[in-house]
Amino acid sequence: MAEQESKATVEEEVEEVEEEEEEEAAGDTGADSTKIAAQLMKNPQVLAALQDKLGSIIGTPSGYIESLPKVVKRRIKALKKLQNEAIQLEAQFYREVHTLECKYAAQYGPLFEKRREFLTGNTEPNDDECDWPSDDEKDEDDKLAVSDGLKDKAAVEDKKEGEEKKEEDAKGIPGFWLTVFKNVDMLAELVQDDDEPILNHLQDIKVKFSDSEPQGFTLEFHFEPNEFFTETLLTKQYTMRFEQDTTDPLSYEGPEIVKCVGCPITWNKGKNVTVQVVKKKQKHKGKGITRTVTKTVKKTSFFNFFSPPQVPEGDNEDDVDEETEALLAADFEIGHFIRERIVPRAVLYFTGEALENDDYDDDDGEEEDEEGDYDEENDPDFQPKAGEKPAECKQQ
């Protein structure tokens, strides 16, 4: 009953606004209509009705383009054709960029091969190769200088020799790629606890570019021989499209990944981290006999990365469900990120320096949090006004 009365009130108020608008059309200056409109805008039910109305028209054509004369529409068609020609040049530009990537990949190769040698400990860098400033080394030298002045010199030397002996036992940079993965949120979400011992055997990640059909790139994950699977090389191939989509040519935003193919993994017995065995009891309705059924189900793991969803081809390209489309989009993003950022700048993601550049937007949020956590009771400069009670007293 109350809702009906409220609805009737709103309808009456709306009718008053309509009457006022009619009076304005007849020559009324509308001084009173402004007051009525202001009163209506204070009514939450009227505001809700207006919001619903506005929400229903958002995104709908204004009708402006359709109302233009034919001669103007003809000129717009000419602009679109020019736009298409510009996009074709853009696509050609990206194809040539890809050709340059293939060219320079050969020059990056020796540098990344030397990186692998250092990571695995197969080669020890010489003094010239280690000639790079390090804040950590300076801090360590300062600590030793202070220790020399405060402690017995012999004890300091013994400690230094022990540390050097421990350092000599370390080979390469242990856990390099696993640390990189765990430092990057996008990759850390994929890595599970069972994946970590396997990723400790990962020695290198390479990018191989292809300038022939199909154009694209392949990620190569090189592992040392391990107890988990027989392969030492796992691959993920990405096919890219540099041309426009023929169904919507003006929507072109640059090259895009359209397909990816993983590789099989030959797991050793009991070492497959991508599946788990589930036991379930079943009871026969008629006989009342209970039996245990063993079932193998898929398990979350980084190594599912090498078994991506299949992309339909030809006339079936549009037959991808939303879940598969989302998985493919995430997979494409990860592959692109590994290619563009992780492989070229691996050491900076290992140390975290690359992450500092990625997260610069967080500073503003931290400053806002500090302002929001202000504690007047612990502020020595805070002086309440005369007669003003502390905040605790006000709440009481």
Image: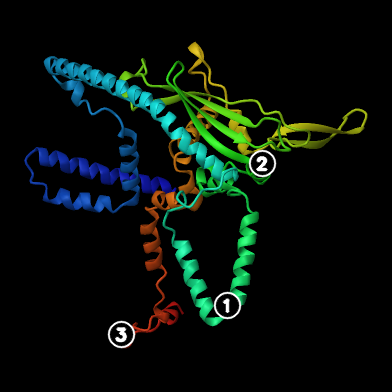
Q: List the residue tagged with mark 2.
A: 198
Residue type (three-letter) at the residue carrying disc 2: Ile
Q: Give the alpha-carbon distance from disc 2 to disc 1, as whole Å.
A: 44 Å
Give the labeled residue for mark 1. Answer: 153
Asked if the residue at tag 3 contacts the one at tag 1, i.e. Cβ–Cβ closer than 8 Å, the answer is no
Q: CA distance from mark 3 to mark 2?
A: 65 Å
Residue drawn at (44%, 59%) of the image: 134
Q: Which residue is mark 3?
A: 385
Could one spot residue 61 in this view of the protein? yes
In the image, taking residue 63 as reference, residue 261 lies left or right, namely right
Q: Nearer the viewer, mark 2 or mark 1?
A: 1
238 and 285: which is toward the camera = 238
First in residue order: circle 1 vs circle 3: 1
92 or 67: nearer the eye?
92
Q: Residue type at mark 1? A: Lys
- Crowd around label 2: few <14 · some 14–19 · many ≥20 (10 Å): some
| Residue at (54, 82) in percent of width and height | 150
Residue drawn at x 39%, y 30% is 104
149 left or right, relative to 372: right
Q: Are marks 2 and 1 in contact (CB under 8 Å)?
A: no
Dot 3 or dot 2, earlier in sequence: 2
Residue that extends furthest to the top in the rendered view of this protein: 315
> What is the x, y in percent for residue 292?
86, 34
Task: Report the side of 61 relative to 359 (left or right).
Answer: left
Against 37, is 58 above or below? above
Q: Amino acid at mark 3?
A: Lys
Q: CA distance from mark 1 to mark 3?
A: 61 Å
The one of 182 and 227 positioned closer to us in this rendering: 227
- Pointer 2 or 1: first along the chain: 1
Residue 297 placement (x, y as % from top left): 72, 33
Q: Quadrant of residue 257?
A: top left
- Answer yes or no: is residue 9 visible: no
